[in-house]
Image: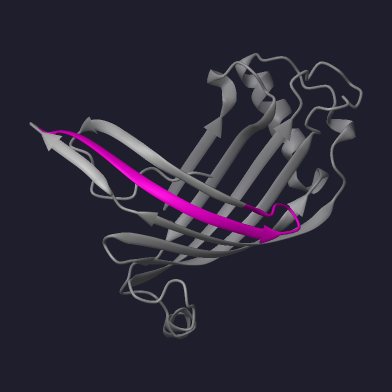
């Protein structure tokens, strides 16, 4: 079981993607149900590694830069929440990690993003966001995701101090977001774990 929190409090602005909370569970390789193994064998992009089932519940929120304005701000990001659950399959060869995931959820007031942001801002003493009455309306969302990571394609270690670079590519197809991504995670530290880097929401 794992939890991840992302927040822009260190950036000093609430603009665009402002907060995310993710709770997830990953099965062991031994406890992967037989029916899910059979489905995994038919997936062409992730069928040659040790497989696990992943389940996640996530809330993400977005807001404009000026949260003290009650009106719609032209040219800025609208208030929006995205509450969803995901189920997927992870395939790990030791050198690559493939993640295929189906996400179902809701955008709008039913995401409870307004309640979350107002509560957190009250607790930490940040300004109260005024424009949530203008948030996107309720709409169901579905997204199909595929991502591949290459573990530590470049790495070096000396006296326990390590450096590595883990590239990744991905694509999302759905009515909430459709996009492609290319990037890499650079890590520097003591006794780095032999994994694919920290998870991202």
Image-based side of 156 in relation to 175, left or right: left
Q: 107 above or below 43?
A: above
Tell me what residue is drawn at x 76 percent, y 26 percent. Answer: 64
Q: Residue furthest left?
A: 159
Position in image of residue 116 (x %, y %):
69, 34
User: Which range is magenta?
Assistant: 160-179
Position in image of residue 55 (x %, y %):
51, 61
Image-based side of 164 in relation to 77, left or right: left
Q: 118 above or below 27?
A: above
Q: 34 above or below 118?
A: below
Tell me what residue is drawn at x 35 percent, y 74 percent. Answer: 31
Image-based side of 175 in relation to 51, left or right: right
Position in image of residue 166 (x %, y %):
34, 46
Rendered image quadrant of residue 96: bottom left
Tell me what residue is drawn at x 78 percent, y 20 percent. Answer: 67
Rendered image quadrant of residue 9: top right
Q: 95 above or below 128?
A: below
Position in image of residue 113 (x %, y %):
73, 38
Query: What type of secondary structure mainly makes up the magenta span?
Result: strand
- Front residue of this view, candidates 12 and 98: 98
Total numbered badges shown on the rendered structure: 0
């Amino acid at each position: 079981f794992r939890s991840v929190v992302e927040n822009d409090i260190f950036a000093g602005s609430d603009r665009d993607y402002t907060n995310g909370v993710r709770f997830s569970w990953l099965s062991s390789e031994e406890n992967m149900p037989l029916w899910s193994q059979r489905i995994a064998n038919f997936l062409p992009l992730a069928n040659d590694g040790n497989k696990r089932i992943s389940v996640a519940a996530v809330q993400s929120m977005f807001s404009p830069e000026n949260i003290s304005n009650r009106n719609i701000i032209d040219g800025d990001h609208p208030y929006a929440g995205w509450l969803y659950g995901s189920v997927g399959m992870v395939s790990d060869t030791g050198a690559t990690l493939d993640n295929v995931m189906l996400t179902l959820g809701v955008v709008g007031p039913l995401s409870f993003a307004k309640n979350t942001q107002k509560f957190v801002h009250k607790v930490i003493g940040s300004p109260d966001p005024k424009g949530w009455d203008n948030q996107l309306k309720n709409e169901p969302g579905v997204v199909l995701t595929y991502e591949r990571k290459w573990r530590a394609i470049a790495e070096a270690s000396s006296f326990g101090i390590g450096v590595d670079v883990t590239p990744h590519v991905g694509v999302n197809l759905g009515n909430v977001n459709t996009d492609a991504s290319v990037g890499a995670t650079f890590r520097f530290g003591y006794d780095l774990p032999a994994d694919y880097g920290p998870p991202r929401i």
